[in-house]
Amino acid sequence: MYEAATGPWPWYVAGPLIGLLVPVLHLLGRRFGVSSSLRHACAAMVPGKAEYFRYDWRSEGGWNLIFVFGILLGGVAAATLLPSAAEVDLAPATRAALETLGLHDFGGLAPSELFAWDRLASVGGFMAMVVGGFLVGFGTRYANGCTSGHAITGLAELRLSSLGAVLGFFAGGLAATHFLLPLVLGG
């Protein structure tokens, strides 16, 4: 009888599988990254309306749209077929710091005090979801790629620009965690 897994795959399984994706895509003449799929989707749905979307998205990004659809489908399947009531495993110091900021729900992937539809009306929820989402989208376009594209493919190809982008992602994440999050949550 099959019993569902109760936790994430260990790093020594998931890491090499992700790492093998880079040479396979390289052999196929493709590059790994998810952010470009939004451009491909817009070009497919609104052809010819903006210069940025006027290109042959089928040959350049058709495979990428299928890949991203697979990511979404896999996420839905995992959430449906492999439910887990386990809390996110946080260090006690991290949990205490988040609790002082008013976050107490550690049962999902993100705290519901910030990431829930009814939180859009609060300043913190609006800042986290709408302003944060805009900044992620803008930053992805400005950096010419997302974290997965730069960190997985770009670093594997020894691109100096990807190294700069990854360092910027981490520096920005640390700054947001230590300075912006307390401001947004009023802590």
Image (spheres, helix red, strand yellow):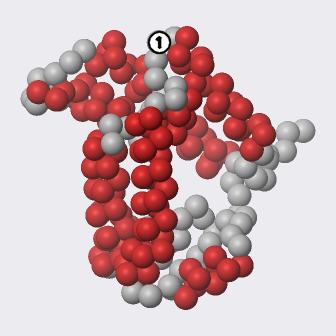
Residue at the spot x=32%, y=37% of the render?
Answer: 144
Q: Is residue 2 above or below residue 6?
A: above
In the drawing, does residue 143 fall left or right of residue 154?
Answer: left
Q: In the rendered image, which residue does mark 1 sit on?
A: 29
Residue at the spot x=59%, y=17% of the render?
Answer: 24
Mark 1 packing: few (<14 Cα in 10 Å), some, or many (20+)?
few
Relative image position of residue 15 (x, y in whole percent):
69, 38
Residues 161 and 69: in front is 161
Relative image position of residue 69 (x, y in whole percent):
46, 32
Of all residues shown, which one is farthest toward the right?
A: 1
Residues 183 and 108: in front is 183
Q: Is residue 92 above or below residue 141?
A: below
In the rendered image, which quarter is residue 58 located in?
Answer: top left
Residue at the spot x=28%, y=44% of the render?
Answer: 142
Name which residue type carries label 1: Gly
Q: Secondary structure at mark 1?
A: loop
Relative image position of residue 77 (x, y in whole percent):
61, 41
Residues 157 and 68: in front is 157
User: Which quadrant would the C terminus be assigned to in this image?
Assistant: bottom left
Q: Is residue 126 above or below residue 79?
A: below
